[in-house]
Each structure stands twice: as C-alpha cells, then as structure tokens.
Amino acid sequence: MIDLHVHTTHSDGQLKVAQILQRAKDDGIDVISFCDHNVVGAYEELTKLDLEDSGVKIITGVEFDFVHKGKDFHMLGYNFDWRKLNKSKIIFILMLIKNFSI
C-alpha cells in the first residue's frame, strides 16, 4: 500500500514523523511521502531517526499553498532533494505571499 500525502506536526498533522512511520509499518504501508504545507522539516527530523528496520520507503514531498485570482490552490511536489529546497527562498516566499493574491 502507498500513501503519498501525509501531514506531520510540521504543518497541520497530528502525529510526529516517528509515530507516522510506526503506524505505516503496522498498517502495511510500503511507501510514504510527507507532504506538509510549505515546509520540509519532516525530512530533517528523519535524519535523526533510525530507519533501518522501518520497512517503509520514503519519497520526498511537499504541498505548496498559494492563492491565484482569489482561489486557494495546493500543488504537490515529489522526489526532490529536500536540503536544496530548504535552502532555497521558494518556501519563504510562499509563506510571505500565502495570504495575498498572485
């Protein structure tokens, strides 16, 4: 089973990364992607965990939120180097303009 749209406590999710991984393992989920809103902190948290026996493949993901012509949009991005995205200005810019129309 695959779940490619999971939110953690880094945005509006209720569980921490380790808790989600344990649930995924218990529920037989083989592939997961953390797609928090405009942040990639879940992947930094992953670097501090022992994933050796998790049995879950992780695909990087993020959910970008923006407003265009007064309508809310959510765009998902996958399979990227989260360290490069974290260093870029795109997430910061999206957070600044989130409440403004573009």
Image: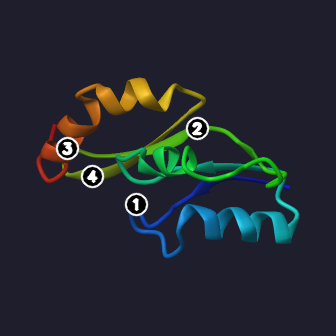
Q: Which residue is mark 4?
A: 71
Type of residue at label 4?
Lys
Q: Residues within 10 Å of mark 1 (few under 14, many from 20)?
A: many
Expressed as whole percent of the image width and height from the top left, the position of residue 62 reads 47, 43
Q: Going 11% across and 48% down the picture, which residue do you hit?
A: 100
Q: Which mark is residue 60?
A: 2
Q: Are marks 4 and 3 in contact (CB under 8 Å)?
A: yes
Mark 3, mark 2: which one is toward the viewer? 2
Closer to the chain start, of discs 2 and 1, is 1
- Tell me how far mark 2 sits from mark 1, CA to CA: 14 Å
Give the SS element for disc 1: loop
Mark 1, mark 4: which one is toward the viewer? 1
- Tell me how far mark 1 sits from mark 4, CA to CA: 24 Å
Q: Going 21% across and 38% down the picture, which residue do you hit?
A: 92
Give the SS element for disc 2: loop
- Quadrant the C terminus occupies: top left
Closer to the chain start, of discs 1 and 4, is 1
Q: Which residue is mark 1?
A: 10
